[in-house]
């Protein structure tokens, strides 16, 4: 409850400053600061390894928990690609402030439009993160990667880099994983009630060679993340296509 109260107080302090900054200057530095501070209040102690992620970069990351958003947004300054329905309006508003790109996962025939929307975001000032697993996983292994959104690199007007990102929760991987139909609120309260701090390492890996098609890129990204996290990976990584 102390952690939850701390995050609420943080929001009440930062939100007005953020809104005023946007109205006066057309932009605000506060979303990544809020995400980083919220992660710290929850107990996360993140460190980043690898060259800084700059604009016009598509980050391809493993997805273990809702904490991934706080960690990557706060430590890397990334925007995100998300499903179009996030539930509570406040959660949607918070996502909007960080430049979230929304896609309809069920709109299979709109895959090209989704990739173009991500490509437009890549032309902005922030790197953009996609979670090709499409959902959070168990933390102990990777789920199949979907390749559709990686097509965005080919639609972007800028010279976009594609970089895998491994979010490593170490010994707490299985504990942090949001999987197996655990209700969202139950997961949130369980992690908020976790004793002690949570060390997390964000490993920004080397850019991939974009000579291949989107499925090759997806395969290489998954292999790089699996190797970094020490997961066993099949010779042919399971890759999803149009969903």
Image (cartoon, rainbow, N blue to C red):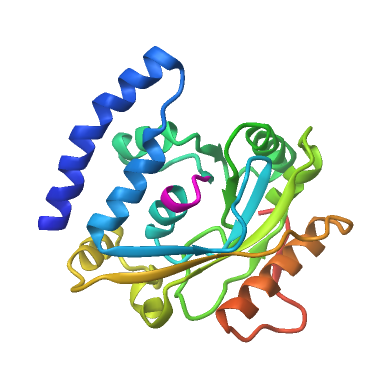
In which quadrant is the C terminus drawn?
Answer: bottom right
Query: Residue at position x 63%, y 69% from top?
Result: 144
Query: Residue at position x 47%, y 54% from top?
Result: 72
The chief SS type of the magenta part is loop
The total number of labels drawn is 0
Query: Residue at position x 59%, y 53% from top?
Result: 52
Region rendered in magenta: 74-78
Location of residue 18 with respect to 209 vertically, above or below: above
Query: Depth check: 100 or 144 in front?
Result: 100
- Whether residue 87 is visible to the viewer of this picture, yes or no, is no
- The quadrant where residue 172 appears: bottom left
In this rendering, position of residue 206 left or right of residue 53: right
In this rendering, position of residue 45 left or right of residue 98: left
Q: Is residue 77 magenta?
A: yes
Residue furthest out toward the bottom: 232
Residue 167 percent location from the top left of the image:
50, 67
In which quadrant is the N terminus drawn?
Answer: bottom left
In this rendering, position of residue 214 left or right of residue 188: right
- Whether residue 141 is visible to the viewer of this picture, yes or no, is yes
Residue furthest out toward the top: 24
Query: Depth check: 100 or 15 in front?
Result: 15
Residue 164 percent location from the top left of the image:
65, 62
Query: Residue at position x 15%, y 49% from top?
Result: 6
Query: Depth check: 44 or 118 in front?
Result: 44
Residue 78 percent location from the top left of the image:
52, 45
- The quadrant where residue 27 appears: top left
Q: Is residue 153 magenta?
A: no
Location of residue 221 with respect to 31 vertically, above or below: below
Location of residue 171 with respect to 71 vertically, above or below: below
- The quadrant where residue 189 appears: bottom left
Residue 104 percent location from the top left of the image:
57, 41
């Amino acid at each position: 409850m102390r952690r939850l109260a701390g995050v609420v107080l943080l929001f009440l302090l930062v939100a007005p400053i953020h809104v005023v900054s946007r109205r006066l200057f057309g932009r605000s530095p506060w979303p990544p600061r809020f995400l980083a501070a919220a992660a710290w209040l929850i107990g996360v102690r993140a460190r980043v390894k690898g060259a800084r992620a700059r604009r016009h970069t598509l980050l391809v990351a493993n997805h273990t928990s809702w904490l991934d958003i706080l960690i990557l947004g706060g430590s890397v300054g990334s925007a995100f690609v998300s499903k179009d329905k996030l539930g509570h309006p406040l959660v949607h508003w918070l996502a909007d402030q960080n430049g979230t790109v929304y896609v309809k996962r069920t709109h299979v025939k709109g895959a090209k439009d989704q990739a173009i929307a991500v490509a437009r975001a890549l032309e902005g000032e922030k790197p953009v993160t996609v979670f090709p697993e499409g959902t959070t996983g168990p933390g102990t292994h990777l789920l199949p990667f979907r390749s559709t959104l990686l097509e965005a690199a080919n639609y972007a007007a800028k010279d976009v880099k594609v970089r895998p990102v491994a979010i490593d929760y170490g010994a707490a991987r299985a504990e942090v994983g949001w999987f197996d139909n655990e209700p969202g609120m139950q997961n949130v309260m369980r992690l908020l009630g976790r004793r002690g701090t949570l060390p997390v390492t964000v490993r920004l890996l080397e850019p991939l060679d974009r000579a291949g098609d989107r499925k090759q890129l997806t395969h290489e990204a998954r292999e790089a993340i699996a190797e970094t996290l020490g997961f066993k990976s099949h010779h042919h990584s399971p890759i999803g296509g149009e969903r």
